[in-house]
Image (spheres, rainbow, N blue to C red):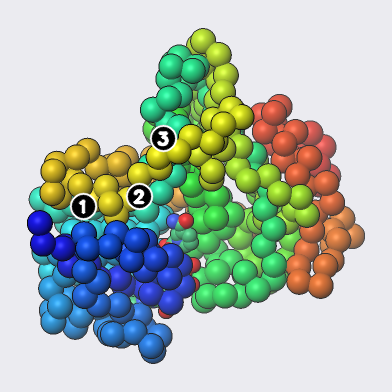
Amino acid sequence: MSPTSVALIGAAGHGAWHLRAIDALGERVRLVATCDVQPGFDYTDHRVMLAERKPEVVVVCTPPHTHLPIALDVLDAGADLLLEKPPVLSLADHRRLAEAARGRVLQVGFQALGSPTLPLLAERVGEVVSASVAGAWWRPDSYWARSSWSGRRGRDGALVNPFAHALMQALAITGIRPPWTIGLDRYRTRASVEVEDTATLRLSVPDGRSVFVAVTLCSGDFVPGDITVAGRDGTAEVGYTQDRLGGQVVPGRIGLLSNLLDHRDHDAPLLVPLERTEPFTALAEAILAGDPPALLDPARLVRREDGVEIPGAAALVRRAAAERAHFHEIGAFQ
Ligand SMILES: NC(=O)c1ccc[n+]([C@@H]2O[C@H](COP(=O)([O-])OP(=O)(O)OC[C@H]3O[C@@H](n4cnc5c(N)ncnc54)[C@H](O)[C@@H]3O)[C@@H](O)[C@H]2O)c1
């Protein structure tokens, strides 16, 4: 079989990761163009690139608010698409994209949905009732200054961007979709950043299933992203970043570009079709429409040379996730 021609739009940021993933596919693919509005790549205008190079598959790794117009151009040019997460930021855009993608292959870059832990969960816990996520990471001041959309209201935030995989994973594990009840408790540590760096989220649907998420980007101690899954027959701990189930790392994660090619070539089931991510888009839209998060009193924070730490953040996040309680419900930040 001749190699599939692939192009990358948005090559300078996280796109470098995709270049390595494309490279790792060896002779199965042929990289025909890289494109970025920054200099140093084959093209600065994706429309020119699409017209001249006619790639069969395009990876789009540009800022989230640019995804829709670029994705529409890619689909219009007749290419299949691996679109980074979050695919779009509103349900209206989601539906527009779904309409345009009819007859084409569109995979969304929620790579943790390629985890081999997911199919094993049902036999461990039975019918899933709830998923509760704890994540405590550290991001320096420079993280919030790296791009024009970083930290901007309506475009970014700990829940919809760095912890997007945690949310998507919990949605996929529980299978819950709107209509749902959403509770949010969001905080920020920097006046210059308009979005949350620390938050809890509770989602519940009428049949009793629920998702709880407690995360921060201001932790000195690292909690990678642990999901406690409760089912009718038991519970299981899943580490979604490392494909850990209980105490064991499960090998065999399926790469999303490789899966997209398998779908094109052999009709393998697509792991992350756009429709699978619609609950995430609904959730992202609701979170992004929220009021600006509360600004934490600097007296509660430890100022480090490169950023801000919330003392005891990892323990706090673990407690909130274990009790499925918002930060304000356990007396934090009052
Ligand atoms: N799947 C993951 O784990 C993961 C990790 C990080 C980022 N992401 C996603 O990847 C995407 C990019 O994130 P990032 O952190 O690299 O953002 P970024 O802003 O640092 O970089 C995006 C790149 O796109 C380029 N760009 C912007 N507009 C463009 C256009 N019209 N045409 C061509 N290039 C353009 C920018 O110059 C930049 O090089 C986002 O959707 C983000 O959520 C996913």
The residue type indicated by label 2 comes to Gly
Lower position in the chain sequence, tag 2 or tag 3: 3
List x then y, in percent, for residue 236.
56, 23
The residue carrying mark 3 is 116
The residue at the point 30 percent across, 41 percent down is: 271
Q: Are marks 1 and 3 in contact (CB under 8 Å)?
A: no
In screen coordinates, is 282 left or right of 224?
Answer: left
Image quarter for residue 308?
bottom right
Task: State whether residue 118 appears in this view.
Answer: yes
Mark 3: secondary structure: loop
List x then y, in percent, for residue 70.
27, 69
The residue carrying mark 2 is 255
CA gap, disc 2 and disc 3:
11 Å
Q: Residue most toward the top?
A: 233
Total count of labels: 3
Q: Are marks 2 and 3 in contact (CB under 8 Å)?
A: no
The residue at the point 43 percent across, 16 percent down is: 123
The residue at the point 46 percent across, 49 percent down is: 284
What label does residue 261 carry, if any?
1
Lower position in the chain sequence, tag 2 or tag 1: 2
List x then y, in percent, for residue 326.
69, 36
Q: Residues within 10 Å of mark 1 (few under 14, many from 20)?
A: some
> Looking at the figure, which quarter contains the C terminus?
top right
Query: In the rendered view, would you say 238 is above or below 68?
Result: above
Q: Ligand 1 shows up in which quadrant of the image?
A: bottom left
Mark 2: secondary structure: loop
The residue type indicated by label 1 comes to Leu
Mark 1: secondary structure: helix
Lower position in the chain sequence, tag 1 or tag 3: 3
Task: State whether residue 207 appears in this view.
Answer: no
Residue 322 or 91: which is nearer the viewer? 322
The residue type indicated by label 3 comes to Pro
